[in-house]
């Protein structure tokens, strides 16, 4: 384990320091322990930390073809995911990075395989599994199969499936991965420009930067720089997510509304601030008592939360209170949510993770808020940056619920209650909210506002099919 | 009066002893003896409660003055009806003026107290002096207590010491004014129009027992529909016992006006609950139907007996019946969800436990009052299996614990079948229903409610019929509370609750004199903890909310649970669906139908 350089409790900053100074393995171990000790927690921090680590992984994996990169990234990713099963953001980022590698790889392949035939079509169907489970054997196999042993980095086999995970064009090809490969040639590139631009470049489109031009189409393709660029864009995307989401605020909030929100969320805060820049409305803020109320209070007053460690993320360090924007904010205890809900016009919530079916994991108490909103027929908006969109399906939702310090519910000093209460006191940090009660999801993706029914498509567009199971 | 006093410490004091700021219901056996409600010496809070305790005593000591008072009031009332009215109006005006004068003085009292352990006593003492001196000095001029005479009241109240206080420092009132407009628009109708009742602000016709009760109600020492109702009736019984009808008027007429003053004072201390309202209406009705020709003592005697009977029938025995009925609905293996604290729910659960039923109770609780902690504690003491959770964890609890039934207490059952209860009950009922829905289970939500609490009012939401708690109670986020050894009897919950009330009394001057403010008598057992609290407040965040424009804190006391979420209402007349509340209410939705 890498030594923690700071005397304070280690956090994101320490991790960044370690990442830049220590070798990769100890950085990985350090992040794993940070995640396990909940010293990095919260979707955003986890996402940033994961991205940074994977970026470093890619940077340090020299002389690697795509196989090797994918293998390495998923190795590291699995370690992180196992360390933090409660933080879906970690897995999301790993999938995103893997997706970038696959994209770039397909780029390369498309550019370099001139006149190649589609010989291994039969085995390509198993690529997605094989490439992950037995990457070594595949790495050795492919250069031969493609007849491109001279440049192994261009041979990544799973790339043919690239098209399948971009549904608008290629969804019909799911499971027939040989299809795209059969037509990859210089001529086909020219003759299918739409396919290429939509399939290959979209990840960079959504990051809002220029498309990486076909550097790989030349004879000397280099995968890594492109991947590194892509991963860096993920970081930018994470940091810009709140602002991009808030762009939708004015379409959702009209003057004189009463909006209920719950717990402390900078994303929601920014969303409301954006709306407040043009319109005047009322915010009712429930505090989420045992776990988040201090942060909520700090958010409301604009004071710096003393419990927060210093390493705030670039965009989070500055948050002005809603009242400074001329909004009147009413803080209520959690118990009053139902009572006040009858006057609310909208509920805006943040989520810890949004699952593919539209269910969400959110701060404990959110379920009650959502159900109360449902009873009063108040529409519920959930702001969900892309790194919170998880492709997993809630077969066992309760394993995502994490339990926190029970001393916050019944102080340990209160021995009578403490000892008398059966099976201990539980303090869940999250609620699992079944799908169906949320009316709109606001993401930083291209269709900024997604109804619950369409969410699964947005989630799936984030990731490659091969990476859904890590 | 002597009778009630003698029975005080033994029966009343013991049975009504609210450990940790709560009020236990009188049991059936001793309910007849529980006359002296005004002196529940709450052992749980130890010496800290001396403040509250001493109030009745001051009141009691001054009580002797009340007799002449009443007599003289009667003498004054020998006048014609029109004059009487005039006099009343004048009195009201005088009281108002008195309050205005007092307001300034009140705010300065804590500022003057020099920190230290003194403050808890001083506040009581300062009002005592005026009140006693007032009475003594008044006994002479009362003879000329014509309307013009009573107009001099304000002058008299502004006695030297208070004027001194006013001149000493004039800063706090400004601060107070600055705090005034912090009202949540939606709930502006609920804010008290005048200052909450204080000992010093009380008019002289207020009976000491009522005075004490008012303070106890104000500070949530007596809390809960039944407790408030019983306490009110007992206080009024004392009022009636010490009352003498002035010659020339009928008891049925004059006693009513006399009671009205008391009621107004209580209402000022805290808005009346439905149970209080219903029983007061009953009492008024009873008084007004007293035969005019009956002798004073006989009428008083019959009234007192009627009050005792009422308490026994409508509350004590009703609780017995409800508990028995509800107990039958508890089966072995049940997991029962309940929220905050309700005396009748507690009684039912303990009753069922005594009958040997094996079940588990989940007490859900929430800020800022944490009543559930007391509930959980008393259940634990009784030997039940208890689980405790906060309202935020309700989804987790309901999902994972396989709740089978949900028992709720009530503040009122409304005419349209909705339940008015402690804020948060609606969420508990809702989650009990919602979370079981997709598991093809049905969790019945059962309301235990005496018919005293049935009301003909029908409301659609929780906004109109509600009560505001002290917003400053929400400020407290001091985590984790440091427990001193002296505080063990009433930790957490009591601390938080009493802190809330301490804020109420101290909020005005909190900013200027934080220390003295939080050590005002409302703070009861907090004296030891205050340094810790202050330390935590420095970084808590919300304590300056009054100064931040646009930021409001809202602490409502009740919410309305829709009838959809209720399955059964158990009252002493039997089990009803919630829609059948008007049946109990009778045609007029009045108490009379079943009285």
Image (cartoon, coloured by chain):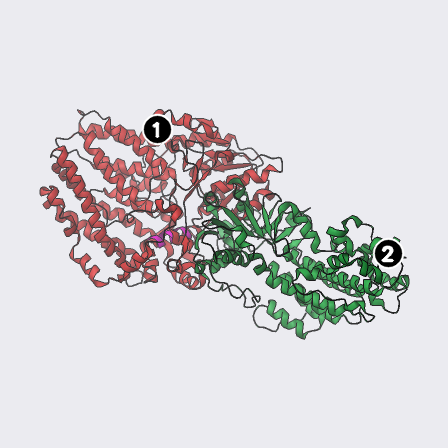
Nearer to us in this view, B541 or B269: B541
Residue B367, visible in the rendered structure:
yes
**According to the image, label 1 marks what residue?**
B591
Describe residue B493's horizontal placement relative to residue A58 as left or right.
Answer: left
Question: In the image, residue B60 lies at what x, y percent?
Answer: 23, 45
Nearer to us in this view, B449 or A130: A130
* Alpha carbons under labels 2 and 1: distance apart: 87 Å
Nearer to us in this view, B278 or A53: A53
* Location of residue B439 with respect to B171 vertically, above or below: above
For the C terminus of chain A, the quadrant is bottom right
Question: In the image, residue A17 lies at what x, y percent?
Answer: 63, 73
Describe residue A56's horizontal placement relative to residue B306 as left or right.
Answer: right
Quick one: which chain is green? Answer: A
Discs 2/1, front = 2
Return the chain for callout 1. B
Mark 2 Cα within 10 Å, few/some/many (few <14, many 20+)?
some
Quick one: which chain is red? Answer: B
Describe residue A393's horizontal placement relative to residue B251 as left or right.
Answer: right
Mark 1 Cα within 10 Å, few/some/many (few <14, many 20+)?
many
* Location of residue B142 with respect to A44 vertically, above or below: above
Q: Is mark 1 on a helix, strand or loop?
A: helix
Give the main secondary structure of the magenta stretch: helix
On whether residue B323 falls in the magenta region, the answer is no
**According to the image, label 2 marks what residue?**
A182
Residue A156, quarter of picture:
bottom right
For the N terminus of chain A, the quadrant is bottom right
Q: What element carries label 2?
A: helix
Residue at far bottom of view: A21
Q: What is the span of residues highlighted in magenta in the rendered image? A: B495-504
Question: In the image, residue B465 lies at what x, y percent?
Answer: 38, 40
Residue B38, visible in the rendered structure:
no
CB within 8 Å, label 2 to label 1: no
């Amino acid at each position: 384990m890498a030594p923690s350089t700071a005397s304070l409790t280690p956090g994101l900053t320490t991790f960044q320091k370690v990442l830049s100074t220590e070798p990769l393995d100890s950085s990985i171990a350090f992040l794993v322990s940070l995640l396990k000790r909940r010293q990095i927690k919260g979707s955003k921090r986890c996402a940033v930390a994961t991205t940074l680590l994977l970026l470093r992984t890619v940077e340090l994996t020299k002389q690697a073809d795509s196989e090797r990169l994918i293998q390495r990234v998923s190795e590291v990713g699995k370690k992180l995911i196992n360390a933090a099963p409660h933080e879906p953001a970690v897995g999301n980022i790993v999938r995103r990075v893997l997706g970038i590698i696959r994209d770039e790889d397909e780029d390369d392949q498309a550019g370099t395989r001139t006149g190649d035939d589609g010989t291994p079509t039969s085995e390509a169907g198993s690529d997605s599994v094989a490439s992950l489970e037995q990457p070594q054997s595949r790495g050795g196999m492919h250069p031969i199969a493609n007849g491109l042993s001279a440049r192994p980095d261009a041979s990544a086999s799973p790339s043919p499936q690239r098209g399948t995970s971009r549904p608008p064009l290629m969804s019909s090809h799911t499971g027939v991965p040989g299809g795209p490969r059969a037509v990859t040639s210089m001529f086909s590139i020219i003759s299918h420009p739409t396919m290429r631009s939509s399939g290959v470049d979209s990840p960079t489109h959504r990051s809002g930067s220029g498309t990486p031009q076909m550097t790989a189409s030349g004879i000397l393709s280099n995968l890594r720089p492109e991947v590194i660029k892509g991963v860096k864009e993920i970081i930018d995307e994470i940091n810009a997510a709140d602002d991009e989401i808030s762009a939708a605020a004015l379409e959702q909030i009209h003057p004189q509304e009463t909006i209920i929100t719950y717990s402390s969320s900078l994303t929601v805060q920014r969303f409301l601030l954006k709306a407040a820049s043009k319109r005047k409305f009322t915010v009712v803020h429930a505090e989420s008592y045992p776990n988040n109320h201090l942060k909520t209070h700090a958010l409301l007053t604009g004071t710096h939360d003393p419990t927060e460690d210093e390493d705030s993320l670039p965009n989070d360090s500055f948050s002005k209170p809603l009242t400074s924007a001329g909004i009147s904010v009413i803080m209520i205890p959690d118990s009053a949510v139902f009572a006040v809900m009858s006057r609310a016009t909208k509920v805006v919530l943040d989520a810890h993770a949004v699952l593919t079916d539209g269910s969400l994991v959110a701060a404990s108490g959110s379920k009650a808020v959502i159900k109360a909103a449902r009873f009063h027929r108040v529409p519920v908006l959930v702001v969900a940056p892309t790194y919170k969109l998880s492709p997993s399906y809630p077969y066992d939702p309760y394993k995502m619920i994490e339990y926190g310090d029970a001393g916050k519910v019944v102080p340990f000093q209160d021995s009578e209650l403490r000892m008398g209460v059966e099976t201990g006191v539980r303090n869940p940090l999250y609620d699992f909210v079944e799908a169906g009660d949320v009316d709109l999801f606001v993401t930083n993706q291209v269709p900024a506002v997604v109804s619950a029914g369409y969410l699964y498509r947005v989630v799936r567009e984030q990731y490659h099919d091969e990476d859904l199971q890590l | 009066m002597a009778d009630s006093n003698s029975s005080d410490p033994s029966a009343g004091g013991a049975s009504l002893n609210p450990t940790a700021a709560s009020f236990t219901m009188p049991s059936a056996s001793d309910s007849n003896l529980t006359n002296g409600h005004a002196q529940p010496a709450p052992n749980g809070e130890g010496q800290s409660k001396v403040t509250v305790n001493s109030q009745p005593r001051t009141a009691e000591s001054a009580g002797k003055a009340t007799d002449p008072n009443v007599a003289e009031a009667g003498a004054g009332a020998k006048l014609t009806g029109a004059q009487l009215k005039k006099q009343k109006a004048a009195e009201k005006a005088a009281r108002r003026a008195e309050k205005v004068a007092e307001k300034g003085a009140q705010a300065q009292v804590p500022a003057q107290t020099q920190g230290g352990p003194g403050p808890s006593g001083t506040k009581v003492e300062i009002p005592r002096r005026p009140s006693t001196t007032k009475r003594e000095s008044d006994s002479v001029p009362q003879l000329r207590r014509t309307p013009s005479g009573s107009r001099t009241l304000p002058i008299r109240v502004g006695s030297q010491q208070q004027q001194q206080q006013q001149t000493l420092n004039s800063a706090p009132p400004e601060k107070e004014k600055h705090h005034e407009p912090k009202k949540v628009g939606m709930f502006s109708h609920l804010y008290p129009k005048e200052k909450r009742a204080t000992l010093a602000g009380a008019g002289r016709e207020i009976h000491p027992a009522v005075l004490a009760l008012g303070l106890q109600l104000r500070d949530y020492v007596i809390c809960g529909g039944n407790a408030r109702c019983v306490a009110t009736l007992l206080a009024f019984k004392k009022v009636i016992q010490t009352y003498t009808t002035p010659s020339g008027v009928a008891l049925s007429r004059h006693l009513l006006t006399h009671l009205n003053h008391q009621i107004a004072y209580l209402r000022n201390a805290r808005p009346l609950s439905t149970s209080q309202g219903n029983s007061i209406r009953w009492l008024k009705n009873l008084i007004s139907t007293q035969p005019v020709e009956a002798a004073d003592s006989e009428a008083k005697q019959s009234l007192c007996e009627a009050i005792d009977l009422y308490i026994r029938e409508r509350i004590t025995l009703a609780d017995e019946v409800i508990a028995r009925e509800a107990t039958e609905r508890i089966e072995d293996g049940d997991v029962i969800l309940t929220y905050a604290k309700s005396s009748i729910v507690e009684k039912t659960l303990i009753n069922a436990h005594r009958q040997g039923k094996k079940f588990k109770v989940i007490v859900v609780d929430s800020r800022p009052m944490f009543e559930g902690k007391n509930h959980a504690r008393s259940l634990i003491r009784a030997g039940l299996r208890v689980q405790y959770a906060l309202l935020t964890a309700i989804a987790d609890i309901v999902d994972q614990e396989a709740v089978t039934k949900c028992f709720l207490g009530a503040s009122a059952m409304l005419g349209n079948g909705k339940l008015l209860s402690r804020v948060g009950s609606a969420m508990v009922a809702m989650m009990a229903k919602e979370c079981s829905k997709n598991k093809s289970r049905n969790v019945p939500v059962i309301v235990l409610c005496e018919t005293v609490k049935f009301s003909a009012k029908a409301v659609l939401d929780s906004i109109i019929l509600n009560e505001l708690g002290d917003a400053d109670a929400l400020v407290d986020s001091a985590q984790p509370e440091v427990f001193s050894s002296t505080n063990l009897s009433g930790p957490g919950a009591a601390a938080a609750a009493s802190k809330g009330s301490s804020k109420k009394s101290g909020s005005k001057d909190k900013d200027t004199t934080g220390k003295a403010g939080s050590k005002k008598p409302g703070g009861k057992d907090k004296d030891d903890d205050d340094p810790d609290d202050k330390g935590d407040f420095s970084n808590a965040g919300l304590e300056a909310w009054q100064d931040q424009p646009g930021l409001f804190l809202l602490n409502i006391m009740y919410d309305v649970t829709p009838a959809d979420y209720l399955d059964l209402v158990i009252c002493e007349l039997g089990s009803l669906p919630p829609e059948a509340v008007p049946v109990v209410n009778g045609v007029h939705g009045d108490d009379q139908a079943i009285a």
